[in-house]
Image: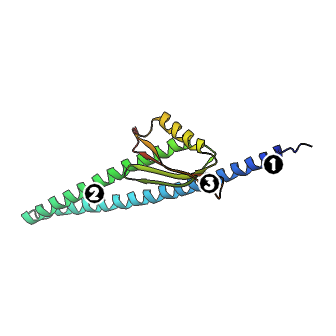
């Protein structure tokens, strides 16, 4: 007597797809919140910069003497540094969104993303897979996409208690965001 496991497999696949969609929705909600927070942060920086510019124009319109000129010069230097920092943050933000778009295109469905971090132009991905081949498939896709300078597997271990492979991948700085 043969046992038909097809309905069970279909149900299992349906559950996996639903779990993937829930995780994807959670990531999207978190990213929208992060985008909103970054927007608020840049808005506050812009307001601060505008107030400093207004202060500078006020100082220029009042009595010009040596102390005021020195104050204006120091405020101008501070403002220039803040503008450079803001531009650097915006560039890093563009790199981060580019990296997320690349991952969205290349990340297989049979991998579970557990942790994603971005620090000093270094992307770290931690997760679980059903098989080690799925991890190598992801790395091949990332290499073929040519979005990162170097990609390496930090850890790849199969636990005895679970039938899954835990992995950790590092990828260095995107090659191009333009």
For label 1, the residue is 8
- For disc 3, the neighbor class at 10 Å (few under 14, some 14 to 19, many from 20) is some
Q: Which of marks 2 and 3 is nearer the N terminus?
A: 3
Residue sitting at x 45%, y 42%: 151
Nearer the camera: disc 3 or disc 1: 1
Q: Are marks 2 and 3 in contact (CB under 8 Å)?
A: no
Residue 110 drawn at (x, y percent): 64, 46
Where residue 134 sits, quadrant-wise, is top right
For label 3, the residue is 23
Residue sitting at x 28%, y 53%: 83
Residue 26 drawn at (x, y percent): 60, 56
Given residues 154 and 91, the one toward you in this image is 154
Residue 168 drawn at (x, y percent): 50, 51
Relative to residue 8, is residue 36 drawn left or right? left
Given residues 155 and 89, the one toward you in this image is 155
CA separation, marks 3 and 1?
23 Å
Q: Earlier in the sequence, mark 3 or mark 1?
A: 1
Relative to residue 16, is residue 118 drawn left or right? left
CA separation, marks 2 and 3?
37 Å
For label 2, the residue is 82
Check disc 3 and report its element: helix, strand or loop: helix
């Amino acid at each position: 007597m043969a046992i038909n496991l097809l309905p069970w497999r279909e149900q299992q696949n349906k559950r996996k797809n639903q779990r993937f969609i829930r995780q994807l929705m959670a990531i999207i909600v978190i990213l929208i919140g992060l985008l909103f927070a970054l927007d608020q942060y840049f808005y506050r920086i812009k307001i601060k910069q505008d107030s400093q510019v207004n202060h500078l124009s006020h100082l220029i319109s009042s009595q010009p003497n040596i102390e005021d000129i020195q104050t204006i010069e120091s405020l101008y230097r501070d403002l220039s540094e803040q503008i450079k920092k803001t531009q650097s943050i915006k560039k890093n933000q563009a790199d981060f969104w580019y990296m997320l778009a690349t991952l969205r295109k290349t990340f297989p469905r049979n991998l579970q993303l557990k942790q994603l971090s971005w620090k000093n132009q270094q992307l770290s991905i931690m997760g679980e897979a059903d098989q080690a081949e799925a991890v190598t498939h992801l790395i091949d896709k990332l290499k073929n996409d040519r979005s990162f300078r170097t990609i390496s597997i930090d850890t790849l271990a199969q636990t005895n208690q679970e039938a899954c492979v835990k992995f950790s991948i590092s990828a260095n700085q995107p090659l191009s965001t333009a």
